[in-house]
Image (cartoon, helix red, strand yellow):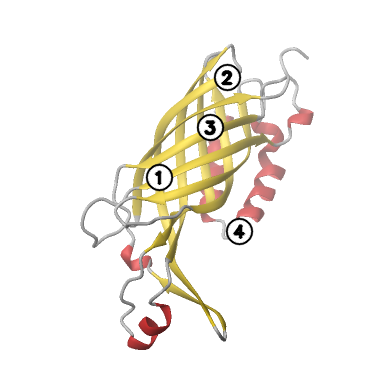
């Protein structure tokens, strides 16, 4: 019961924290040693991802570095539940064709630019894992994301130098996004607590509000889950 209360309190604090790094330091100091035992793992999630979006005619891939917190509960040797709270999480696309900016002067400057779309989210992926021999696992589950910021970046190379324009598109992006994740991974150390994996994260709902057709985010990520405070933890073998 204490672990459940601590876990709920953890995510409330993380959600309302204005700084990802401050939240992680605070959580590690308060909960690091208490949430890590033979059945529970708590720590930092980091990943590097390649992102695309359907329905916007993008010809490139937007790359992002994401991070947050994770909590893994081992139901038994084979079945594990993994929940993450990603406070720094970005999706989007690169190489979107130029569109009318609503200003003739800006159109003249940026008509040859391609658009880099960056959308920041608070995201909660939750996956059920099946681990073979307690080490190699496959995972599948839903993902709910709440968008916080969104912008299109246009850059052109002119004789007088590079020019960059940031266009705020928050009003054009759906507030919530529903999706899924699936992937493979492994626990890499002797105690089988540090996890490395590869994921595909896709969308069920449209990203943009007023565009025709479907605009779904797609992301391929290489990630690591790194527990906090494991050095002081006593395992069953101890």
Name the residue tied to disc 4. 19
Residue 4 is labelled as 3
The local crowd at label 2, few if under 14, some if 14 to 19, many if 20 or more residues have their Cα within 10 Å, is some
> Which is more foreground, mark 4 or mark 1?
1
Residue furthest out toward the left = 212
> Which is more foreground, mark 2 or mark 4?
2
Name the residue tied to disc 2. 136
Q: Are marks 3 and 2 in contact (CB under 8 Å)?
A: no
Q: In this view, does 60 lie to the left or right of 54?
A: right
Q: 57 or 72: which is nearer to us?
A: 57
Dot 4: element: loop
Residue 219 point in image, percent of width and height? 45, 44
Q: Residue at 59% of width from left, 11% of height from top?
A: 133
> Which is more foreground, mark 1 or mark 2?
1
Q: In this view, does 169 lie above or below 68?
A: below
Q: Residue at 64% of width from left, 32% of height from top?
A: 35
Mark 4 → mark 1, Cα distance in angstroms: 26 Å
Name the residue tied to disc 1. 218
Residue 135 is labelled as none
């Amino acid at each position: 019961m204490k672990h459940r209360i601590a876990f709920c309190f953890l995510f409330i604090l993380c959600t309302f924290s204005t700084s990802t790094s401050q939240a992680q330091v605070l959580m590690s100091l308060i909960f690091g040693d208490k949430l890590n035992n033979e059945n529970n793992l708590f720590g930092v999630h980091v990943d590097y991802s390649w992102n695309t979006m359907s329905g916007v005619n993008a010809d490139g891939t937007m790359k992002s570095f994401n991070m947050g917190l994770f909590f893994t509960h081992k139901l038994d040797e084979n079945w594990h539940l993994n929940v993450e709270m990603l406070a720094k999480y970005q999706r989007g696309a690169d190489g979107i064709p130029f569109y009318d900016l609503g200003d003739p002067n800006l159109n003249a400057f940026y008509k040859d630019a391609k658009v880099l779309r960056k959308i920041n989210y608070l995201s909660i992926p939750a996956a059920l894992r099946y681990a073979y021999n307690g080490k190699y696992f496959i995972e599948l589950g839903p993902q709910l994301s709440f968008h916080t910021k969104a912008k299109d970046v246009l850059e052109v190379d002119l004789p007088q130098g590079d020019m960059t324009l940031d266009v705020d598109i928050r009003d054009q992006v759906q507030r919530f996004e529903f999706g899924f994740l699936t992937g493979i991974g492994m626990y890499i150390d002797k105690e089988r607590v540090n996890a490395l994996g590869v994921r595909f994260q896709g969308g069920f709902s449209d990203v943009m509000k007023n565009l025709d057709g479907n605009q779904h985010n797609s992301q391929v990520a290489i990630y690591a889950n790194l527990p906090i405070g494991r050095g002081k933890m006593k395992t069953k073998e101890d």
